[in-house]
Amino acid sequence: MALDTGLVGRSYPPSAVYEVGREKIAEFAAAVGATDAVHTDAAAARAAGHPDVVAPPTFAIVVTLAAAGAVVRDPDVDLDYSRVVHGEQRFTHHRPIRAGDRLVATPVVEAVRSVGGNDLLTTRVDVATEGGEPVCSATSMLVVRGDA
Amino acid sequence: MSATVRAAEVEVGTELPEQVYPVTRADLVRYAGASGDLNPIHWSDRVATAVGLPGVIAHGMLTMALAARAVTTWAADPAALVEYQVRFGRPVVVPDDDEGTAVAVRGRVAALGEDGRARVDLTVTCGGEKVLSLARATVQLA
């Protein structure tokens, strides 16, 4: 089923607040093998100019993946997840995510294309603090494989 | 913390040291838990083969994270990566044994901006095959 190009520009309400904890950052850093002390040692992070421990660059996906669920569950999108492959991913960081951040994530449908019988769905999730300071944007392109 | 890479020390064509990161099934389980991506194609051979994959594959986002490590290790600053994009090409198949597989990351500075930013083009391979394409990182140099 082809995705409706009329979805482009559709935005969704901001997510519930995601509170970033030091232990979660340490857990994620260990999982990707990031050993720099700024991920685990608040004193080292402060020495490097950060208010608290900072997350590795792709940690943003933890916050944005859950928020992008709003798009996937949209009845008008009606995604068959068994056919979905992650095609592309992009992050734009305004500053590192750090412990103590209270983040909200706002998804928007950025593009819908059909290429070679597959649907390409691009969503962008903008992440900001509860107070409105921009932190990062994550753009994901999903490939929905056709029947052929 | 080691010294950061300074813009004056970098030119177009500067190569990053190659990094090789082993990936085992245990790494996939750890990443699944830490990231919240519990898709069974990353831990169940039964499910992976049922959807036509050769076997359990690594999370694309784990491969992306490993490639980022090669960049931030070179820059000596995990906060220096300001823009980062990849296209997922070929899956990284992770066998159920003690060795697993390995992802190799090479990088080359492709452009330098006047704002002290360097664009690094990455070549990310597994078993000699490219697994990411259009992999680019923009680094704010010191």
Image (cartoon, rainbow, N blue to C red):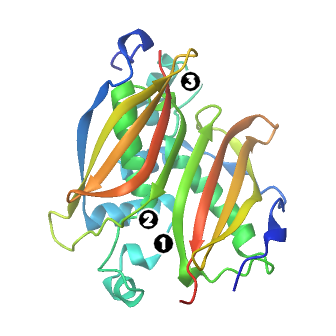
* Position in image of residue A107 (x %, y %): 75, 57
Q: Is residue B70 above or below residue B95?
A: above
How many numbered marks appear?
3
**Residue B38 disc label:** 1
Residue flagged by tag 2: what amino acid is it?
Ala
Residue beneath label 2, please?
B32
As drawn, the residue found furthest toward the left would be: B98
Residue flagged by tag 1: what amino acid is it?
Leu
* Position in image of residue B96 (x %, y %): 21, 74
Residue that appears at 33% across and 36% down = B107
Residue flagged by tag 3: what amino acid is it?
His
Residue contact at pointers 1 and 2, CB within 8 angstroms: yes
Position of the N terminus of chain B, as image quadrant, is top left
Residue that appears at 84% across and 59% down = A13
**Residue B91 disc label:** none
Q: If you read the primary sequence from the N terminus, does the residue marked by circle 1 or circle 2 appear first?
A: 2
Distance between mark 1 and mark 2 Cα atoms = 5 Å
Residue contact at pointers 1 and 3, CB within 8 angstroms: no
Residue contact at pointers 3 and 2, CB within 8 angstroms: no
* Position in image of residue A132 (x %, y %): 81, 38
